[in-house]
């Protein structure tokens, strides 16, 4: 028995040893496998460990801020909040305070005022059978101040979810330049237009992360186990835009846009000595906080157009620089046959007779410029200057979407019209660059709008943008002489730029009235159906600013000039900017008074089309009014060669049916002129100014009609009105 028992005992020991050995071997293999393998049974071991023993927290970074030249924020990332309401009473279970909406009527009433949402709409949301609801568009992206106002109401159940949004403090302000952002699927801000888009990589941020170790119960282990990946905030952008000058421009454009309802407005204000763009804008515009966008094109850099007579300053500069310009030489105005085919007309098709080239510049004569191009300068030599001014290529301004324009220069007539701004197209920013050569004594400065890019975290400048000379198309002497002549465009009785005079400051510049092409490729005709513009430099002797303004197809009254909306922007912005820059007014430079005393010579309008006559008269500072429905002028109330003051009304008789105007307030001289124009049988009673007329306003006016008018002196009219009032009272 003992031997048998001993046998079984030894066998059991062996099996125990073998099982134990196998267990340890399999354990070692398993441990080795777990150490070497990434995935076991379909589960990533590292991810499993991180999930159970590691925890991390995002450290949010901020998108870079865009500043103006003085460090004023124009676009910045701010915390916004979404307002929600907890509706389920279970949220307040086991809580000493109410965590759900208790009084829905009170809550809707008080929130409606702050969120600017209809009370009934909010009440409808609060009545939904849900645990929690967002309070609609009005409750999204609210500011910190609104959040604090709501918190003060202490309304139970109202909660806030924070998020980041892009905020533009000034609303409609250089909007196409700044652009706007949207939020992607990850909640990150992404630039969609303007500098926000083109500089998205610079502005973009990288969130950081803080990692912790924890035990299996979820307790965070001591801080020495903490790992931190710091966030990297986006770079900050500093622009050359000056908020005060940009505000002047925005306000002026808004006024003109409201009053004249034009199709487009484009305006740029630059420093010609450096190329810095200190203000730029267009209409229509938008508020990037709400993205009410109707025009996605930054027109001052992206819209190529036929600029009209502002381009004459570059033909003039080329002629002066080549020594072929003689301002005292005479030419016959009115019309000019282009060598090789075609005819060019002045706005006054009858012409002003034989005038000097200086007077031709003042009057904006197409004929004068055509002679300079074809007979003095030569088309090929002019083409080289045109290119030297930068008109066949982009300026390279650091804004997206720039256009290069289009050169139409194959046939003799195309070459001629390019010299006075028709046919070939350019951009406003190209005009600003080219004009800097005239303002800056021959040195043409490349325009730029970004001053520097700064690392937000270190305050170190990542990239600096400096002034850059883009070329020297003319000499300093040419530039100075040209500015002197362009100053007379504003001050001379013959000049077309009277509206652009600024009291206390001298202005050199050139007006432009360009024809506009319709969708069929034909030029549109009619009063106001043009692109009106002005390129101006101030002060004229040493310009601190170059300002370009263009207004497309404004809605003008019969008595309004095309220059009215353009000059409203130019004068207010330029004067305000010069005063802000502390530029001293010129001594004895009361330009407005000088211009107002200047007389205007009435042109011969008979034989012109009504549109041509109106265009000519308005360009001289007159206020033409057509009395008839015809398309040709057959008479005018003031004969040609008569000297009148600026702003005088002149009535035009046409070859169609004519209507009687209101003559109330007219003088005896005025009504006599109307009588002579229509051979009326006129009876005048009294003296002073007309207070009544026998032919009613808008009645058909025919030759040899009887017209009776009564005149009263202003004081007699007042006394007569007083007597009427006394009689009524008695």
Image (cartoon, rainbow, N blue to C red):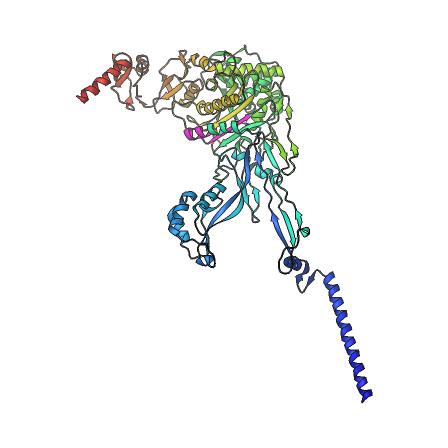
Farthest right residue? 3
Residue at figure coordinates x 26%, y 18% from the top left: 692
Specify the quadrant of the image occupied by residue 685. top left
Q: Where residue 307 appears, x then y in whole percent?
A: 52, 26
Q: Where residue 52 appears, x then y in whole percent?
A: 64, 59
Q: Quadrant of the N terminus?
A: bottom right
Say whether residue 710 is left or right of residue 299. left
Front residue (pair 556, 689): 689
Say whether residue 680 is left or right of residue 471. left
The reply to whether residue 268 is visible in this rendering is: yes
Say whether residue 62 is left or right of residue 99. right
* The magenta stretch spans residue 554: no
Residue at figure coordinates x 51%, y 31% from the top left: 281
Farthest left residue? 730
Front residue (pair 227, 247): 227
Q: Quadrant of the C terminus?
A: top left
Front residue (pair 512, 678): 512
Farthest front residue? 96
Q: Where residue 219 appears, x then y in whole percent?
A: 62, 57
Residue 129 versus residue 181 in the image, above or below: below
Front residue (pair 620, 467): 467
Residue 118 versus residue 588 in the image, above or below: below
* The magenta stretch spans residue 255: yes
The reply to whether residue 426 is visible in this rendering is: no
Farthest bottom residue? 1
Q: Where residue 66 appears, x then y in whole percent?
A: 57, 35
Residue 13 versus residue 348 in the image, above or below: below
Q: Which residues are magenta?
A: 253-269
Q: How many marks?
A: 0
Specify the quadrant of the image occupied by residue 644. top left
Residue 384 versus residue 100 in the image, above or below: above
């Amino acid at each position: 028995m003992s031997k048998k028992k001993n046998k079984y005992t030894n066998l059991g020991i062996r099996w125990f040893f073998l099982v134990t050995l196998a267990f340890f071997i399999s354990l070692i293999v398993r441990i080795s496998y777990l150490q070497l393998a990434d995935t076991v049974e379909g589960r990533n071991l590292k991810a499993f460990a991180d999930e159970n023993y590691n925890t991390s927290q995002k450290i949010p970074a901020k998108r870079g801020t865009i500043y103006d030249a003085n460090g004023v924020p124009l676009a910045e990332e701010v915390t916004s909040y979404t307002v929600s309401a907890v509706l389920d009473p279970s949220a307040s279970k086991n809580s000493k305070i109410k965590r759900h909406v208790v009084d829905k009527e009170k809550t809707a009433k008080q929130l409606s005022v702050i969120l600017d949402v209809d009370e009934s709409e909010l009440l409808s949301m609060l009545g939904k059978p849900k645990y929690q609801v967002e309070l609609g568009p009005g409750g999204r992206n609210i500011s910190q101040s609104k959040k604090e106002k709501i918190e003060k109401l202490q309304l139970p159940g109202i909660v806030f979810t924070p998020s980041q949004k892009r905020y533009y403090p000034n609303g409609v302000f250089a909007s196409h330049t700044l652009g706007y952002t949207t939020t992607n699927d990850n909640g990150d801000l992404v630039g969609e237009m303007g500098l926000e888009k083109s500089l998205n990589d610079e502005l973009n941020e990288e969130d950081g992360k803080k990692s912790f170790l924890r035990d299996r119960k979820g307790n965070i282990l001591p801080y020495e186990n903490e790992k931190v990946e710091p966030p990297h905030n986006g770079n900050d952008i500093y622009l050359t835009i000056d908020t005060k000058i940009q505000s002047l421009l925005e306000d002026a454009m808004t006024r003109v846009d409201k009053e004249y309802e034009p199709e487009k407005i484009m305006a740029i204000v630059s420093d010609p000595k450096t190329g810095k763009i200190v203000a730029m804008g267009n209409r229509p515009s938008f508020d990037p906080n709400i993205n009410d966008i109707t025009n996605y094109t930054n027109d001052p850099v992206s819209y190529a157009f036929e600029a009209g007579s502002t381009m004459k300053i570059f033909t003039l500069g080329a002629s002066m620089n080549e020594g072929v310009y003689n301002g005292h030489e005479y030419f016959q105005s009115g019309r000019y046959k282009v060598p090789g085919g075609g005819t060019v007309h002045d706005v006054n098709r009858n012409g002003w007779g034989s005038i000097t080239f200086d007077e031709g510049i003042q009057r904006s004569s197409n004929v004068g410029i055509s002679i300079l191009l074809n007979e003095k300068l030569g088309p090929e030599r002019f083409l080289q200057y045109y290119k030297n001014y930068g008109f066949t290529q982009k300026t390279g301004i650091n804004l997206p979407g720039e256009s290069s324009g289009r050169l139409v220069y194959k046939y003799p007539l195309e070459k001629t019209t390019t010299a006075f701004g028709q046919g070939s197209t350019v951009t406003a920013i190209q005009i600003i660059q080219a004009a800097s050569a005239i303002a800056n004594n021959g040195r043409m400065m490349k325009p730029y709008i970004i001053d520097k890019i700064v690392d937000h975290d270190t305050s170190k400048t990542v990239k600096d943008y400096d002034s850059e000379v883009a070329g020297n198309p003319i000499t300093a002497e040419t530039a100075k002489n040209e500015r002197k002549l362009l100053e007379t465009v504003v001050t001379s009785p013959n000049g077309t730029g009277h509206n652009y005079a600024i009291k206390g400051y001298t202005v050199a510049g050139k007006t432009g009235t360009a024809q506009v092409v319709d969708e069929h490729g034909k030029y549109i005709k009619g009063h106001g159906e043009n692109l009106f513009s002005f390129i101006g430099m101030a002060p004229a002797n040493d310009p601190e600013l170059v300002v370009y303004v263009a207004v497309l197809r404004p809605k003008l009254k019969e008595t309004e000039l095309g220059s009215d909306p353009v000059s409203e922007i130019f004068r207010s912005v330029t004067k305000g900017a010069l005063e802000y820059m502390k530029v001293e007014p010129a001594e004895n430079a009361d330009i407005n008074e000088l211009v107002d005393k200047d007389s205007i010579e009435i042109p011969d309008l008979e034989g012109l089309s009504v549109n041509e006559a109106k265009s000519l008269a308005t360009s001289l500072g007159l206020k033409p009014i057509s009395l008839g429905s015809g398309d040709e002028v057959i008479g005018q109330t003031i004969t040609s060669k008569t000297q009148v003051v600026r702003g005088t009304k002149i009535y035009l008789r046409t070859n169609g049916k004519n209507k009687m105007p209101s003559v109330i307030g007219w003088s005896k001289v005025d009504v006599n002129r109307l009588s002579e124009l229509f051979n009326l049988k006129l009876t005048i009673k009294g003296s002073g100014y007309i207070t009544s007329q026998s032919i009613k306003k808008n009645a058909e006016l025919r030759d040899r009609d009887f017209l009776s008018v009564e005149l009263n002196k202003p004081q007699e009219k007042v006394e007569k009105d007083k007597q009427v009032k006394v009689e009524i009272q008695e």
